[in-house]
Image (cartoon, helix red, strand yellow):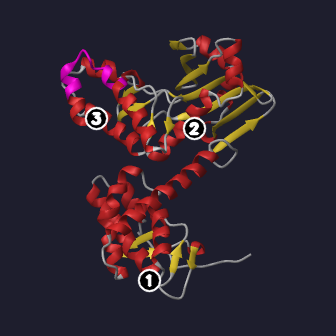
Amino acid sequence: GEVLAMEYLDDAPSLQDRWDAATEDEERVDALTRAMIIIAKLHNQGVVQTDIHLGNFLMKDSRIYTIDGGEVVQKSATPLQEAGSLENLSWFFAQFFPRFDELVQVVLPAYDAVRGWQTDPARVIDLHGQILKSRESRKETYLEKAFRDCTRFHCESSFTRFLVCERESDSAELRTLLENPDQFIEEGILLKNGNSATVAKVRLGDRALVLKRYNIKGAFHGLQRAFQKSRAWRSWENSYHMEFLGIPSLRPLAMLETRLGPLRGKAYFVTEYIEGPDALDFLRSNRHSNGEPEALANLLQYLSSSQISHGDLKATNFLMASEGPVIIDLDAMRQLKDPQQFEKAFNKDLDRFMKNWEDQPELASRFEGLLKFPK
């Protein structure tokens, strides 16, 4: 083997540490600006950090150190060309949630100054386009891992079932639940008992969980569903899509599909139980809100900026948790890449959302002021 000895930097937090501790955009801009300066210096030398993220830059006494040398590549003996520079920058910015994309044009001048480049609006537009492509690529890899055996997930696939769960939640108790989920539903507290889905609050040791069963309503319905991804599958996938985008949602623990070879039957979705009323009850009983309408509007804006349609924006599909609103019921959620298709679907979402407040004109007026409606 080989051994590499390096100087130890004591009390040298990473720029990721600074980002995580930031509570204001001013602090985030400071962390990004420091990263822009060092990345520009690397690019000036024809060097690229291929695993480019804030955790690979340490700060000590206002000096930035680039680490993880195994991922540092000398691309050329001359300064990196614009195309290669923007590609590397796009991978850097793609790691952040979309709501922080507005900071790109704030910190990019620091990069341009080190490179000796004149500010070019066309370059900024080009970079934003590449960020979207790089983030989409990261998302596909991220979601792909949620359906296979890996560090984070345990996955089992057999002739009779498909199971995936979070490794940190994998336990004998959870396996007992997944071996006989219907019994847990019968013994739990019913939250919903519909034709298409049955939802129950169940206990697993000292934890409260939500167990949702997607029902087969009949032979014809079963035949239709047999060849499609189950609603539990889509809920599991969309939960991690929300996590990837930083949008508050359910915390999934496990997903189970009963199968007969390639044919799918009943499916189950297990999540953490979220304490709190739904948005409809909360806002109707709390006339003097404390920023909750704004928080809901922000959540909808996050969906819009990523071109995601929820499909059923009833106020009961938002839970008002202690840390803020959380969106639930994700099986109809979809990302629409065509702008016209998305606009049509999201407008339908907004219309459904506003119907919740038809008997509360003051609250409806407040939401109309917070949300962008098509003319």
Element assignment for label 3: loop
The range drawn in magenta is: 352-365
Label drawn at residue 44: 1
User: At numbered mark 1, what does the secondary structure look like: helix, strand or loop?
Assistant: helix
The earlier-in-sequence mark between 1 and 2 is 1
Disc 1/disc 2 C-alpha distance (Å): 41 Å
Q: Nearer the viewer, residue 161 or 204?
A: 161
Residue found 44% across the figure and 27% down from its top: 274
> Which is more toward the observer, 140 or 352?
352
- The image quadrant that residue 276 belongs to is top left
Q: Which residue is mark 3?
A: 373
Dot placed on the residue nearer the N-terminal end, 3 or 2: 2
Q: Residue at x 62, y 32 (%)?
A: 233
| Residue 290 appears anywhere in the view | no
User: CB of mark 3 within 8 Å of CB of mark 2?
Assistant: no
Mark 1 and 2 residues: CB-CB less than 8 Å, in contact? no
Mark 2 crowd level (few <14, some 14–19, many ≥20, 10 Å Cα)? many
Q: CA distance from mark 3 to mark 2?
A: 29 Å
Most frequent secondary structure within the magenta stretch: helix
Please, what secondary structure does the residue beneath circle 2 have?
helix
> Is 217 placed left or right of 22 in the picture?
right
The amino acid pointed to by label 3 is Phe
Percent coordinates x, y for residue 67 in the rendering: 51, 73
According to the picture, the residue beneath numbered tag 2 turns out to be 237
Whether 64 is drawn above or below 247: the answer is below
> Does 243 appear above or below 232?
below
